[in-house]
Image: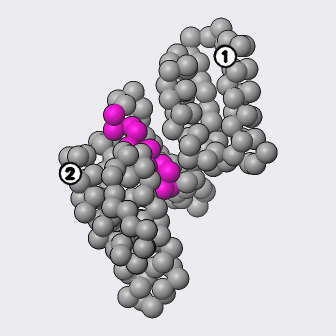
């Protein structure tokens, strides 16, 4: 078994135990710390649906370090689900130099601002001569775009000869996705 399959089984067992051993208290909390990191993309959205449908009486907290996944969920899933809220938590410093949490609620619908950030950062690195870093950010933008295509089942041009495809073939469809979100 691969890691994704083992993670899915472990999460299933955990959630099954939570359902079986019902907490007899009015405020039920389910805290899941970075559980999506071990799951493949095919199991991530179904897990969100399971949490929504099978645990409606729980206040669910999900934490992640995976910023592209967070942005994807915020833009594509939470926009259509008003019962979810997004918070970003960062490390800050107190006046005495202690590390303190800085919690910021992210309101409003998700948009594709993270794509603009990735592209702008890639351009900045490219202009500074760091092509490796530029490539990392450009790849992140491209991967985020592809995830949106897959999630929305967007039809894209297909060519057996890949040399006939350009990034503009995807860019046109990306503009359509952005217009659909507005």
The answer to whether 90 is drawn above or below residue 127 in the figure is above
Q: State whether residue 79 appears in this view.
A: yes
Q: How is the image coloured?
A: one colour
Please state the extent of the stretch shown in magenta in the rendering. Answer: 67-80
Other residues around mark 1 within 10 Å, as few (<14) / some (14–19) / many (≥20): few
What residue lies at 64% left-to-right and 42% top-to-bottom?
35
The answer to whether 173 is drawn above or below residue 20 in the figure is below
What residue lies at 46% left-to-right and 61% top-to-bottom?
143
Residue 158 image-quadrant placement: bottom left
The residue indicated by pointer 2 is 179
Question: Residue 27: x, y in percent?
Answer: 56, 16
In the picture, measured across the screen, residue 149 lies left or right of residue 93, that is: left
In the picture, measured across the screen, residue 48 lies left or right of residue 148, that is: right
Other residues around mark 2 within 10 Å, as few (<14) / some (14–19) / many (≥20): few
Of label 2 and label 1, which has the lower sequence position? 1
Question: Residue 56: x, y in percent?
Answer: 50, 18
Residue 68 counted in the magenta span: yes
């Amino acid at each position: 078994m691969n890691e994704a399959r083992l993670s899915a089984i472990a999460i299933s067992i955990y959630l099954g135990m939570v359902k079986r051993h019902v907490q007899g208290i009015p405020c039920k909390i389910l805290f899941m710390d970075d559980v999506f990191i071990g799951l493949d993309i095919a199991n991530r959205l179904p897990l969100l649906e399971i949490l929504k449908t099978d645990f409606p009486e729980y206040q669910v907290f999900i934490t992640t370090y995976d910023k592209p996944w967070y942005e994807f969920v915020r833009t594509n899933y939470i926009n259509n689900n008003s019962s979810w809220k997004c918070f970003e938590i960062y490390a800050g410093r107190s006046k005495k130099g202690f590390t303190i949490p800085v919690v910021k609620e992210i309101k409003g619908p998700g948009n594709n601002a993270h794509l603009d950030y990735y592209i702008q950062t890639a351009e900045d690195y490219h202009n500074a001569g760091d092509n490796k870093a530029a490539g990392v950010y450009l790849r992140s933008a491209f991967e985020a775009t592809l995830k949106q295509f897959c999630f929305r089942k967007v039809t894209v041009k297909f060519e057996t000869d890949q040399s006939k495809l350009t990034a503009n073939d995807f860019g046109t469809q990306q503009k359509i996705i952005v217009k659909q979100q507005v």
